[in-house]
């Protein structure tokens, strides 16, 4: 996801009537062969990329009413048509200030995010309206044709002195892998090249025959392999943004988890014969494309679109060979497309069709990611309630899967029982501030709510509504685990909230 080469030099004979005639025609008819006064400049590192400086602030998931300290990043963005600049979404995440800077002159202008897709790790920037447009006169990059294995790609950089540095390498592999979010898989390239980072750039444009082929995400110096956002993913993102950036649909997802069918016992259990491929469906996400198509746990997915699926979950891509089946959906299809599937169910091959949709982060029971918005929370007299999200769990660090609270990890991994209960979100008591209202409750934390004041709590909005209806002036708060129920004086909690705000907690709830 070959630029034209220059024509051979036209050679005139050294002597003879042809030369004389041509010379005469040039004298008599000067319009016969006139070069333009100035040829259009070609894309280059000097006139087709721009520095991007970003200041960002993450939200604090342990203290949801505040943000962490500001941080700064810089990168090189690719200049595209309409004075827009392509960068990674990771660079633009939680941005509070974005600035474009010309590498040669240092001239700067403030920018804004026009569109962002955190799953595909792509963002499109443009100068703020009314700001000086330092991109005028620059040469926009076109999007390359999909490069092939063995092609030479160029990584463009700018040195501290403003001059270009180009590193060439060989495209050695294409695979489906995560870019930025571990749960989102997309086509990526691997480039073999000895790369030296210049000026601490966060990401770099990758060029194929004078056109943009990708964005470099990372470099492993040990094996000299760079990981790159692939051309088809960039093309897909830009196509959808340019349709309607205010209603950007994103990339579709099928909404399944599966197991490989290499085990003979599993193959026998499912009824697969020795010549059949396919993968065993272990999970179908609620309201996903697969769910609405009628795919069920226990089915074997044999074919997706025009491609047979092998026992490992791969298909034969005509350009890149064996690729994970997710690229059929995310690389070649769009939201709203209909895609046929062949499945094996109870020993019979069945044809079904899915209308592809995208399930956004906030539509999941547990948000898989959260950027540019703070975590939802309610403080009640020092009791802090939140909606469970993966970023909350990831606040425990790289080993969050083993170090975060076990009950919350289990809820994140096994969401189906909560969905069957009708929950929209999992609301839990995250921690307790020491206040007069919370005496005796200080050690409580990470308890999942079930009811408040006799009302089921299926979202933080439900909790907010239930807290407006105390029973005889007392809030009755029930959990799924010990201590099962606690009681809080409603008037005292309200007074404590006012005191907390005076002490520096600017807001006591966020529901949007």
Image (cartoon, helix red, strand yellow):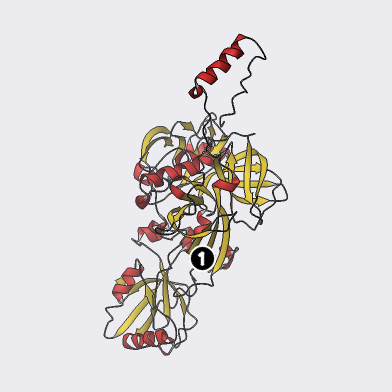
Give the image quarter of residue 347. Answer: top left
Residue 110: x %, y % from top left:
47, 61
Q: Secondary structure at mark 1?
A: strand
Which residue is the extreme one toward the right?
A: 222
Q: Nearer the viewer, residue 193 or 469?
A: 193
Q: Nearer the viewer, residue 2 or 448?
A: 2
Q: 376 above or below 188?
A: below
Q: Nearer the viewer, residue 474 or 87?
A: 87
Give the image quarter of residue 448. Answer: bottom left
Q: 128 above or below 212?
A: below
Q: 316 above or below 235?
A: above
**Where is the C terminus found, in terms of image quarters?**
bottom left
Residue position marked by numbered label 1 in the rendering: 56
Residue 251: x %, y % from top left:
43, 46
Which residue is the extreme one toward the bottom?
A: 436
Residue 497 in view here: yes
């Amino acid at each position: 996801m070959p630029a034209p080469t220059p024509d051979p030099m036209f050679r005139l004979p050294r002597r003879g009537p042809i030369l004389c005639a041509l010379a005469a025609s040039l004298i008599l008819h000067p319009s016969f062969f006139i070069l333009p006064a100035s040829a259009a400049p070609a894309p280059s590192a000097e006139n087709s990329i721009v520095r991007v400086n970003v200041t960002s602030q993450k939200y604090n998931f342990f203290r949801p009413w505040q943000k962490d300290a500001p941080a700064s990043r810089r990168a090189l963005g690719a200049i595209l048509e309409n004075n827009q600049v392509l960068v990674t979404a990771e660079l633009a995440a939680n941005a509070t200030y974005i600035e474009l800077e010309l590498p040669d002159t240092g001239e700067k202008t403030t920018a804004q995010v026009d569109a962002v897709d955190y799953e595909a790790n792509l963002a499109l920037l443009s100068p703020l309206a009314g700001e000086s447009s330092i991109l005028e006169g620059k040469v926009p990059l076109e999007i390359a044709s999909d490069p092939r294995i063995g092609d030479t790609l160029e990584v463009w950089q700018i040195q501290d002195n403003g001059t270009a540095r180009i590193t060439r390498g060989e495209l050695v592999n294409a695979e489906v892998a995560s870019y930025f979010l571990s749960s989102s898989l997309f086509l990526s390239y691997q480039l073999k090249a000895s790369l030296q980072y210049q000026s601490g750039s966060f990401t770099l444009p990758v060029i194929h025959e004078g056109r943009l082929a990708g964005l470099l995400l990372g470099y492993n110096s040990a094996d000299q392999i760079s990981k790159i956002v692939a051309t088809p993913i960039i093309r897909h993102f830009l196509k959808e943004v340019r349709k309607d950036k205010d209603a950007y649909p994103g990339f579709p997802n099928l909404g399944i988890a599966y197991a490989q069918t290499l085990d003979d016992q599993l193959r026998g259990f499912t009824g697969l014969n020795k010549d059949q491929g396919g993968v065993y469906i272990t999970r179908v996400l609620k309201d996903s494309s697969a769910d609405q198509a009628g795919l069920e746990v226990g089915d074997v997915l044999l074919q997706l679109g025009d491609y047979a699926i092998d026992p490992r979950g791969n298909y034969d891509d005509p350009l890149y060979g064996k690729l994970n089946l997710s690229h059929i959906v995310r690389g070649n299809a769009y939201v709203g497309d209909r895609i046929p599937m062949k499945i094996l169910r109870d020993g019979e091959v069945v044809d079904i069709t899915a209308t592809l949709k995208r399930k956004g982060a906030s539509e999941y029971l547990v948000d898989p990611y959260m950027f540019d918005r703070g975590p939802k929370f309610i403080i009640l007299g020092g009791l802090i309630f939140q909606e469970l999200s993966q970023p909350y769990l990831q606040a425990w660090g790289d080993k969050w899967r083993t170090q975060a609270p076990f009950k919350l990890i289990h809820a994140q991994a096994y969401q189906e029982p909560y969905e069957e209960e009708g929950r929209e979100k999992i609301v839990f008591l995250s921690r307790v501030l020491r206040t007069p209202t919370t005496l005796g409750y200080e050690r409580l934390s990470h308890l999942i709510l079930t009811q408040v004041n006799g009302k089921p709590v299926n979202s933080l909005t439900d909790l907010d509504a239930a807290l407006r209806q105390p029973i005889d002036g007392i809030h009755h708060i029930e959990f799924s685990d010990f201590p099962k129920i606690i009681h809080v004086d409603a008037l005292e909690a309200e007074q404590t909230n006012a005191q907390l705000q005076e002490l520096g907690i600017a807001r006591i709830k966020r529901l949007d």
